Amino acid sequence: MSALFVTSTGTGTGKTFVTAGLIRHLRDRGKRVAALKPVVSGFDPQAPEGSDPALLLEALRRPVHESELARISPFQFRAPLSPDMAARLEGKTLDFEGLTRFCSQAIATHDGVLLIEGVGGIMVPLDERHTVLDWMARLRVPSILVAGSYLGTISHTLTALDVLARRDLEPRALVISETPDSSVPLDETLATLANFTHVPLIVLPRACSSSEHDTIFECLARLTEI
């Protein structure tokens, strides 16, 4: 089993797009692949279409049914807030030990490649004491960091890389997912980031051909050794 954690600098950078893209790429090449989105907030179980878990299930070619959603996303919260806040609104606390146990069991039992998509950015609180970073540190599996190309992303990205390095969790790849209508040229963002990190950079343009898309995800698969 090969496991990979997909995290990001913040919400809305493209984690699910990257995870779903990797799923399709691996499936098209005949590899066995599974995926988890263990924690999801802003989730309406009565209207799951378009949600992150639903998009992963579609990429896996599995039905978007309640049982399937519960299987890949057992920690579901309605409010579009950080998991600690969303859980508190429901009178709950996210079970961090249960979360890490759920992921560890999946890593130990699945054959092929297992993709685990995080929630929000790496420092998003899960409960009163744990963040996504703590979750990653507990699992100790290789990771991908996804960032945008908006104004401010350089500071956010370098801060995220520094925090990961301090916990010996340096990612195998840094994916820059192009932010629509960004005021900053994409190539300038990439050039500056390259001056401050040796983590391999992968560029994911919003508009690219199917062949370019395949090349990007093949490169990402090789870098992450999945």
Image (tube, rainbow, N blue to C red):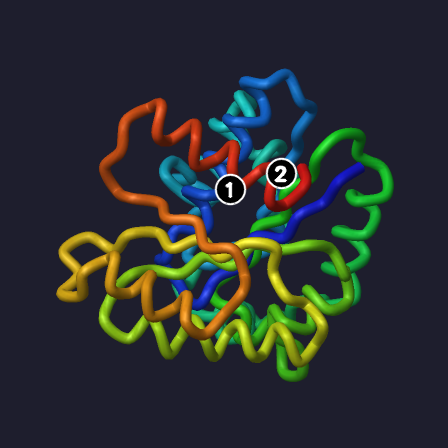
Q: For the point 43% across and 49% down, which residue is it?
A: 202
According to the picture, the residue beneath numbered tag 1 turns out to be: 19
| Dot 1 alpha-carbon crowd within 10 angstroms: few under 14, some 14 to 19, many 20 or more | many
- Where residue 13 appears, as percent x and y from the top left, is 37, 57
Q: Please tell me whether residue 43 is drawn above or below residue 62 in the rendered image.
A: below
Q: x and y percent of residue 127 in the render?
A: 62, 76
Count of numbered marks: 2
Q: Which mark is residue 35?
A: 2
Who's the residue at 46% across and 34% down the image? 21
Q: Decide if residue 31 is on the left or right side of residue 152.
A: right
Q: In this view, does 208 lie to the left or right of 95?
A: left
Can residue 76 be seen in this snapshot?
Answer: no
Determine whether 72 is above or below 12 in the image.
Answer: above
Disc 1, disc 2: CB below 8 Å? Answer: yes
Q: Which of 128 and 213 is in front in this view?
A: 213
Q: Which amino acid does label 2 sit on?
A: Ala
Residue 213 at x, y percent in the picture: 37, 31
* 192 vs 204, nearest the viewer: 192
Q: Horizontal placement of 7 versus 189: left or right?
A: right
The numbered mark, 1 or 2, whose residue comes first in the sequence reads 1
